[in-house]
């Protein structure tokens, strides 16, 4: 009996110890859970990019000459057509005046040719033909009269021969006058006009070239903007091979990003974007260009995102973070990014709290990844509670004490 009682006590103690050991080995862990939400999720492409002005003009003179005067300084706001600098141009002024004088002379000669000399020559040729024909008719009449008198024996042969010579001379004069008139009518008049017109055109071209050379000495702004660089000083030689100044239009800036081809393929011109500067301020933007070609050197695709530069807060040359909207999935299963666990092999899991108040590991397939939210393609159902705080290093089937957390917001 005593032995039996001792055995029973031992058994009872054994059971008690086992229960106490289990309670010590599996304590409840406090975690926060978030139900799986069905909601829209946006996929963004994020990268670093360098800012450039939307418009920029690096002004290089078309002629080489010393700078006579600058009318603007670095930082000045300028407008399209505004005079920025004046180059020395005394020689160009003299050349332009000479060309203008030659043009005036050519215009006067052309007017004279059209209104005076050429029509007069044509008229004179017509009068010469008329006079020659009249003289020929008179010579013909005299010859016929003397021929009759010679036949009657009233005139010597010598007088008749002279009348014949006079008639022949008159006929030759008429033929020459007619040929001259015909030559003028066939093209001599037109050729003279063309010659006068060609002389005038040549003078006009030389005058235009001289005026253009003179205008090149005046440096004007091609656009509205700000003077961002002016490396040359007054009195120095401005050359056709060196920039005289740089004008930038800072009202709009462009972030030029270089993306892998697979990421660039997700983007389209017109897509929503944001630019975040070094100070953390965010500016709305939009994708304007997705290059159709891959850069051979870097095997990346250049993408531009354009933004309004209010208050000139964005400075060209600055590196910014650009986020570009690739797509919106309207009905996705979404969990907080903190709920996703990834092991060294790349496998993705979440901890799901069951009805037994234990956390159970479950493999999931991930879609869109954003900093705060993750799309789940496979492995979860809407409404299931997943551990969003405290899942790291949590063993499978661990008892948990649950603190609810709101679902991710769209």
Image: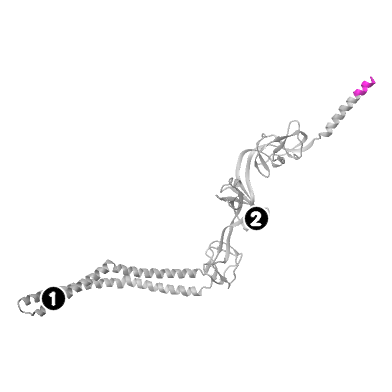
- Residue at the image point whose x is 63% and y is 46% from the top: 44
Structural crowding at the residue carrying mark 2, measured as other residues with C-alpha within 10 Å and reported as few (<14), some (14–19) or many (≥20) = some
The residue that disc 2 covers is 319
Q: Earlier in the sequence, mark 2 or mark 1?
A: 1
| Quarter-of-image position of residue 77 | bottom right
Magenta span: 1-8
- Residue at the image point whose x is 5% and y is 76% from the top: 151
- Residue at the image point whose x is 63% and y is 55% from the top: 50
Element carrying mark 2: strand
The mark found on residue 164 in the picture is: 1
2 magenta-colored: yes
**Magenta region, mostly helix, strand or loop?**
helix
Residue 2 screen position, x and y as percent: 95, 21
For residue 228, say whether it is visible. yes
Depth check, front residue: 253 or 143: 143
289 magenta-colored: no
| Quarter-of-image position of residue 394 | top right
For residue 131, say whether it is visible. no
Residue 305 screen position, x and y as percent: 59, 52
Element carrying mark 1: helix
Depth check, front residue: 388 or 183: 183
Residue 183 screen position, x and y as percent: 26, 69
Pick the quarter of the image with the N terminus.
Answer: top right
């Amino acid at each position: 009996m005593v032995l039996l009682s001792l055995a029973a006590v031992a058994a009872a103690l054994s059971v008690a110890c086992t229960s106490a050991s289990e309670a010590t080995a599996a304590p409840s862990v406090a975690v926060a859970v978030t139900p799986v939400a069905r909601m829209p999720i946006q996929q963004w492409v994020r990268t670093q990019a360098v800012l450039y002005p939307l418009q920029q003009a690096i002004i290089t003179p078309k002629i080489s000459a010393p700078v006579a005067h600058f009318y603007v300084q670095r930082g000045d706001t300028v407008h399209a057509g505004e005079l920025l600098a004046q180059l020395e141009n005394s020689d160009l002024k003299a050349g332009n005046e000479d060309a203008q004088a030659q043009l005036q002379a050519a215009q006067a000669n052309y007017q004279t040719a059209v209104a005076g000399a050429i029509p007069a020559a044509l008229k004179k040729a017509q009068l010469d033909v008329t006079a020659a024909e009249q003289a020929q008719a008179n010579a013909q009449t005299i010859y016929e009269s003397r021929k009759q008198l010679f036949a009657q024996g009233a005139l010597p042969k010598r007088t008749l021969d002279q009348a014949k010579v006079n008639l022949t001379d008159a006929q030759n004069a008429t033929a020459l006058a007619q040929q001259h008139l015909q030559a003028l009518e066939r093209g001599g008049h037109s050729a003279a006009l063309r010659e006068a017109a060609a002389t005038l055109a040549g003078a006009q071209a030389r005058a235009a070239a001289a005026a253009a050379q003179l205008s090149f000495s005046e440096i004007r702004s091609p656009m509205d903007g700000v003077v961002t660089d002016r490396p040359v000083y007054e009195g120095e030689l401005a050359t056709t091979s060196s920039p005289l100044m740089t004008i930038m239009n800072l009202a709009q800036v462009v972030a030029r990003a270089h993306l892998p081809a697979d990421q660039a393929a997700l983007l389209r011109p017109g897509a929503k974007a944001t630019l975040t500067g070094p100070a953390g301020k965010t500016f709305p933007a939009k994708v304007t260009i997705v290059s159709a070609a891959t850069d051979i050197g870097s095997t990346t695709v250049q993408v531009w995102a354009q933004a309004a530069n209010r208050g000139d807060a964005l400075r060209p040359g600055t590196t910014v973070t650009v986020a570009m909207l690739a797509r919106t999935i309207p009905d996705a299963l979404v969990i907080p990014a903190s709920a996703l666990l990834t092991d060294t092999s790349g496998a993705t899991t979440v901890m799901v709290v069951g009805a037994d108040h234990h956390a159970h590991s479950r493999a999931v397939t991930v879609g869109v990844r954003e900093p705060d939210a993750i799309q789940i393609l496979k492995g979860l159902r809407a409404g299931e509670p997943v551990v969003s705080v405290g899942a790291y290093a949590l063993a499978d089937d661990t008892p948990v004490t649950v603190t609810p957390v709101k679902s991710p917001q769209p």
